[in-house]
Each structure stands twice: as structure tokens, then as C-alpha cells.
Image: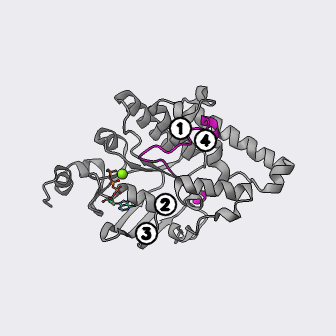
Amino acid sequence: MTPLLTVRGLTIRFGGVTALNQVDFAVQPGSITALIGPNGAGKTTVFNCVTGFYRADGGTIRLHAGQQDEEGLNLLTLLGEPVRWRDCWQPQRLAERLYYQMFGGPHLVNRAGVARTFQNIRLFNELTVMENLLVAQHTQVDAALLSGLLRSRRFLAKEEAALQRATEWLRFFALHGEANRLAGELPYGHQRRLEMARALCTNPRLLCLDEPAAGLNPNETRLLSQLILTLRDQFQVTILLIEHDMGMVMEISDHLVVLDHGEVIARGTPEEIQQNPRVLAAYLGTGAG
Ligand SMILES: Nc1ncnc2c1ncn2[C@@H]1O[C@H](COP(=O)(O)OP(=O)(O)OP(=O)(O)O)[C@@H](O)[C@H]1O
Ligand SMILES: [Mg+2]
């Protein structure tokens, strides 16, 4: 089967530090693929490259989301320059600029079918839950100045669809009773779910979750595992998961990729990874392997 995502030779340096060195891995469509490794291994950096926050120094990141040829779409070629403030007189451009300011430059990657959540939750705390979900959909809603001002039928229909999509995902994440609360007032676990809802509102093929269980209690983690499995099984969303909760990772993942010091040291099923001596050494910090 053609993978949904293929990462080849991904390399990025910060000053003298090589944070990722020739990273290769693939994500099969319809899978839950976990990216694990000790602190500082480079996991979040992989997400930042895949979702367009960082510009890699080398390698390719190909998304095979169906509409492209066999080669897929190289996400690295999508990363144009951010919208300049002086071009922000158009509401759509302004929204893109604000989004860029908050989340980096990923709206084009997002449009191609990739969405993410963040290790440290990033929400617009002063906006309501519903507003957070509507802002996220600006890349889909045609907010051109004229059609917005004229409130054309097409514009209103898209706005209505955005509202409906947001409502459906709020219901899925059991947040529908909180649509009008400020995002910043939600309990921590709810904020984590709201971030996922926001990502899903953009209709991604690939959802990248950066430590979604961090800070959750065991009950919340169990619920989260169920929700992720449902996303895969009933909504055909492919998941790329960074997570330190090994119980959760081993239970729900189809495939694992292990990073250490910016390099892939192992790939395989949960059973294979659990018995891999290099992986054990990396986690125990013995430096062996
Ligand atoms: N913008 C940056 N500037 C400089 N160094 C960076 C930058 N982003 C990441 N790094 C470095 O890259 C390395 C990998 O960091 P990264 O955040 O990807 O690790 P991680 O695997 O996600 O760790 P954790 O499990 O603690 O979240 C670290 O040494 C980090 O300091
Ligand atoms: Mg990280």
C-alpha cells in the first residue's frame, strides 16, 4: 500500500546542533503510527517540519493524499513566505497572518490535509470554544472581502457548514455544553480535547498529536485512547502520535518509530519495539546499542 506520508532523509540543524539527521519513516493510511523517544530526541521537531513550522535543511516530506500522482505532494515545497502585514487589508489575508503569528506557517500544509495539536496547548484563550473552531476553518471558508460584505449565498452556506462541522466535533469530544465558554476557562483535559477538535475541523487526512495524554488522569487517558481509535476506525483519520505514556502507545499503535538524538533507531510493531535492545538502552540512558 502507498503510505499516506513518506519522510526521507529529513535533516535540520540549529546552529551547530543537528536536531534531526537523515530521518526516514512512513505512515500507512488508516494507521496509528507512534513517534517515541527520550526527551530531546527530536520528536516535536519532526512535527514542526511535517506541519510547516520549520523549514528542513534537507530531505523530503511527501503526502500521498489521493489527488496527486505517485510521487505525492512534497510538503516542503508548499512553504511560501508568510503573508505580509501590509497585504492584510483582506479579511482572509489578515486571518492567515494572525494564524501564522500564532501557529507558524502551516496553513498551506493544513490545506493539503495535515493538522496537528501542540505539546504545550495553543488556543486563543480569550475567544470562546466555538470561536476557536471557526477561526481554525478560515482556510476552508471563502472570506473574500466582497463576498463577505455582500454576505453572498455561497459565503453564508460556507459559514453555516463551518458552524455545523464545529458543532459535530464538539459533540464528538463531549464539549458541546461548553461552546460559549472562553477557551482559557476550560479545565486542562477539556482544552486538550478542544485542540483536537480544532485540528479535525480542517478535515485532515493526517492528524499529528503531540503528547495528547500529557497531564491527563488515567480516566481521561483511557477516554482519549478510545477517541483516537474511533477517529481511525470510523472517520478514516490517519494518526501520527507522539506520546510518553507507553501503556497508551503500546495499546493503540499499529506501528512505532523510535528516535534518539535525532536519528531513527528502530521501527516496528509494539511487540518488536518492546523487545528491542537499542530502544531499551536509549530509554535507560546506558548509551549501549
Ligand atoms: N527552534 C529551535 N532552536 C534551537 N534548538 C531547537 C529548536 N527546536 C528544537 N531544538 C532542539 O532540537 C532537539 C530536539 O527537540 P524536540 O523538542 O524535537 O525534542 P522532543 O523529542 O520533542 O522532546 P520532548 O519529549 O522533551 O518533548 C533539542 O535538542 C532541542 O533543543
Ligand atoms: Mg516534544
Which amino acid type is marked by label 4?
Asn
- Density class for disc 1 (Cα within 10 Å; few <14, some 14-19, many ≥20) is many
Dot 4: within a 10 Å radius of its alpha carbon, few (fewer than 14), some, or many (20 or more) residues?
many
Quarter of the rendered image showing ligand 1: bottom left
Q: Look at mark 2 in the image and give the residue it sits on.
A: 53
Q: Which residue is mark 1?
A: 194
Residue tagged by mark 3? Answer: 56
Q: Which residues are magenta?
A: 111-131
Q: Position of residue 24 (x, y in %)?
A: 36, 66
As shown in the figure, which amino acid type bears the numbered disc 2?
Answer: Phe
Q: Which residue is disc 4 drawn over? A: 132
Element assignment for label 1: helix
Q: Residue at x 60, y 35 (%)?
A: 129
Please tell me which residue is depicted at 31% across the width and 41% down the height of the picture: 245
Q: Secondary structure at mark 3?
A: loop
In the drawing, does residue 85 fall left or right of residue 26?
A: right
Residue type for callout 3: Ala
